[in-house]
Image (spheres, grey):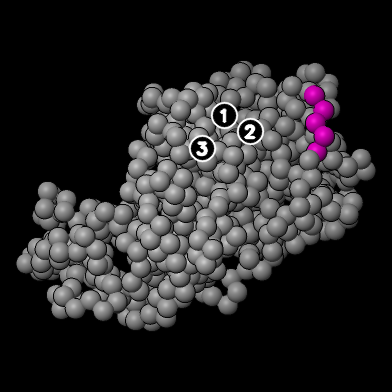
Amino acid sequence: MCGIVGYIGDKKAYPILIKGLSRLEYRGYDSAGVALIQDGKILNVYKRQGKVQDLVDFANDFSTEGTVGIGHTRWATHGEPNDVNAHPHFSGDENIVLVHNGIIENYEIIKKELTKRGHEFKTETDTEVLVHLIEEIKENSQVSIEEAVRMALKEVHGAYAIVLISKDSPDKIIAARKSSPLVIGLGEDEYYVASDATPIVEYTKNVVYLEDEQIAIVDRKNGLRIISIGNTEVSPYVQELEMQLEELEKGGYDHFMLKEIYEQPRAIHDSFRGRLNAAESWIALGGIRDYENQIANADRIVIIACGTSWHAGLVGEYLIEDLARIPVEVEYASEFRYRNPIIRPNDVVIAISQSGETADTLAALKMAKEEGATLLGIVNVVGSSISRVTDAGSYTHAGPEIGVASTKAFTTQVTILAMMAMLLAKKRGTINQTRFQNLLNEMEAIPEKIEYLLTSNDYIKGIADNYKDAANALFLGRGSCFPIALEGALKLKEISYIHAEGYPAAEMKHGPIALIDENMPVFVIATQGPNYEKVVSNIQEVKARKGKIIAIVTKGDTIVKDIADHYIEIPETDELLVPILATVPFQLISYHIAVMRGCNVDQPRNLAKSVTVE
Ligand code: F6R
């Protein structure tokens, strides 16, 4: 959370910073700010509560000159989101300015110490404490700015990605990271620093991902130098970005979320391209090839994730247990890491994460590593922290997901999990050739079936119109579609602010049924399969209490269609792949309801895309 950006080179820094902040706005949008060094001596800082556009409107009246600068878009942790707490933050003498993503956990102790030494603080943030600490060390020890940063970072606990500039060293940017991401872009005599590659990709494809506890010193004349916090030189490892600029634009859609929903056929195809071939009857996940035997013989698989990615993990549990017969446990990363779990060396731990930066998931992985477990990742963002901490893994290849509500990341995560389940089943001999072949055929057909489903968008929008004023909603599903009920409820609540809950359909009668009356929409997955008749009974129970039923049914269904208030048909597929198809109508319903309610679909209140704080 929080997006940070920096530039040093020959160009005017301000437009680059603003464009970069707009790209990073998905990481937080409580306030935004920039700092620019003008003529090597004047430090101009502009910051504003609200969106990047509010900052631009404000800065219009002032000088935005300068070829070195830093910027920040905030998701508030310490201190309310207002102009004062917005980044960048000044040192006491106003020579240094710093932007920060993360949390300095021991900031109160440091603040007390610094206050005793005469420092005065103007904000409630942990970040201001850090920049004062750097100033204090620089003055007391008479060291360079980079050495002061290094010494200060040795004293702080917590997570940080920081970028700073100083009036005394106007041709340098200093950046450092621990548990929060930072990428450095290398152009022709110019350098970019950012929380991810999205602000960089249109200028250069050559990047260096900073590792934990590394400090980058970017000097206009001498280029990039990296040292560790322990003060050893590190040679920068330059990688080439695969990202395309068009992937970061809305491409004619009203919102990124809608674009990303529509991208699912392509994204899912990319996630299995080269990994599965129905005509030749094979499946291969190159990234985990060396670990296949270990996974197939694991005592159990533990899946750790948060939010939507956790829902994908739950689908994975159904798929892997059903097909490969390996015990699977799915854990919230935030609970796992604090509850002293039993982890054995023969366990395989799979982390699922779109961003690859979720702080809880990363911490849980590190804990599992210490216990000797094998770590795998199912990650979307290439080069992200989780992809680097794990022993092996499979990228989802969904492409950048900018809308805060996860859509294509989820369906591609489930695609990878389905392939993993099939691969392991084949290896363990727990699947016969007919079922295996059928699953391969069905998987290859999923993108086309989603294309077909998307042609119902206007029809689904019409259904959404009936429920846009609901105060509550229930989502029901059974078996591998129970997690889709959870995901449907999460989508609706996070972007439209309607309270929604997901339940296994049969659990309804153990409590939630008390909520049902004529005002309660109940979204039910009632596709053909072994539980079909049971779900029909659950629907009857809702109807008997005057609840409104919106059912997702298999194309050609006749029974549920007659009972439901509204129905959405999805194409027939293997029962284990229904979760992928059933997700799409829920995404569209949530999207349309949120738009009709006037909500900010791509940037829902209080949320951020990449949750790099605990
Ligand atoms: C919901 C959503 C979040 C994320 C969660 C984990 O739409 O996007 O619940 O799924 O914050 O994020 P990642 O997958 O990046 O670890």
Disc 3 to disc 1, C-alpha distance: 37 Å
Which mark identifies residue 477? none
- Residue 526 at least partly seen: yes
Q: Badge 1, how many Cα within 10 Å: few under 14, some, many 20+?
A: some
| Residue beneath disc 2 | 178
Closer to the observer: label 3 or label 1?
3
Residue at image x 43%, y 24%?
344
Closer to the observer: label 3 or label 2?
3
Residue at image x 19%, y 70%?
549
Query: Answer yes or no: do the residues labelled 2 and 1 have beta carbons within 8 Å?
Result: yes
| Vertical arrangement, residue 415 with respect to residue 343, above or below | below
Disc 3 to disc 2, C-alpha distance: 34 Å
User: Is ligand 1 within 8 Å of the beta carbon of the residue shown at mark 3?
Assistant: no
In the picture provided, is 95 more to the left or to the right than 283?
right
Q: Badge 2, how many Cα within 10 Å: few under 14, some, many 20+?
A: many
| Vertical arrangement, residue 280 with respect to residue 452, above or below | above
Disc 2 to disc 1, C-alpha distance: 8 Å
Relative image position of residue 275 (x, y in whole percent): 56, 57
Q: Nearer the viewer, residue 22 or 297?
A: 297
Element assignment for label 3: helix
Q: Which residues are magenta?
A: 232-236
- Residue 607 at least partly seen: no
Three-letter code, disc 2: Lys
Residue at image x 52%, y 41%?
292
- Per the picture, the main secondary structure of the magenta-coloured stretch is loop
| Residue beneath disc 1 | 158
Three-letter code, disc 1: Gly
